[in-house]
Image (cartoon, grey):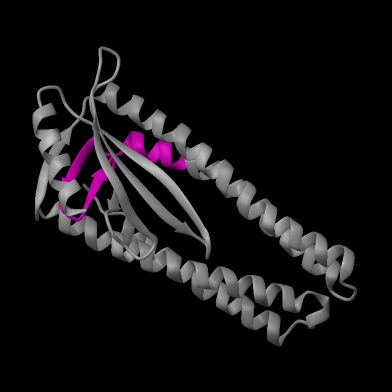
Amino acid sequence: MKNPNWKRGIMSVIAAITFVILSVTGFTFIDGMNGGFALAFVSLYLAVSAIAVAGLFTYHARVMDTILSGTHVHAHWTYPEGEAERSANREFREYQERNRGLFWVVGGMLGVVALVFLVFVGDGGVETAALLFLVIIIIFIVSKIAPVRELKRALKTSHEAYIADNGIIYEGTVYPFHSFLMKMTGIGFHEGNQKKPAVIVCSFTQLIGHYIIQSFEVAIPVPAGYEMRAREIVDTLSYRK
């Protein structure tokens, strides 16, 4: 299994450098009242966010390397194609719902700020509002594209799961139990039935921006015959959490 997080971290660093250059350009070469201040502050905010994302991906890459090396791994399960496809589609729908809610929160706040600049600020207000609305449009497009790209990636990646002391890998994505922006808040075992397999459900919270905390769950299907082992894993990780 490949570790894509190193590449994502490098891309985030490149994005941060690009936004820093745009911020300096806004302060230095563009008149502040004609959009310079807006470009500078928005670019600076995006640069700081990109740096945080780069740090997150770097940490995820290290955790994933540790798990793939076999260190403190409790289980390594592989799944047939049909079951993996159903799981990927379920994750896709949940990802869409999370992105929709996040867009209304972040986009709504940016929209209010843009309207304030548009209505109450004179010189530079229109330019600043236009830039903020452009950022909202970009966030909306990304919120729509990201789940589709993640679905395609999940369908192409190796259909397997790792459960270790420091995190899990499921469908090629690593979820550390503790990081500076994410932590596991709970883990449980859910019995299966004729339609659905038993699953281990890991609950996480993730900090988005400065004040927005997003909750989500990762459901790892338990192969038939491994239910007892799954309960033991849940008991062990619940004790260590």
Picture residue at 17% right of the left edge, 45% below the top = 163
Picture residue at 48% right of the left edge, 67% below the top = 50
Q: Residue 173: in sight, yes or no?
A: no
Magenta stretch holds residue 218: no
**Taking 187 as reference, is 136 left or right?**
right
Picture residue at 47% right of the left edge, 50% below the top = 214
Residue in front for this viewpoint, 67 or 24: 67
Pinpoint residue 33: horizontal percent, then vertical percent. 83, 79
Pinpoint residue 18: horizontal percent, then vertical percent. 54, 73
Q: Is residue 59 above or below residue 107?
A: below
Q: Residue furthest front?
A: 239
Q: Residue 105: in sight, yes or no?
A: yes
**Taking 90 as reference, is 72 left or right?**
left
Picture residue at 43% right of the left edge, 64% below the top = 53
Q: Which residues are magenta?
A: 149-172
When asked about the image quadrant of residue 39, the answer is bottom right
Pinpoint residue 204: horizontal percent, then vertical percent. 35, 49
Pinpoint residue 106: horizontal percent, then vertical percent. 62, 55
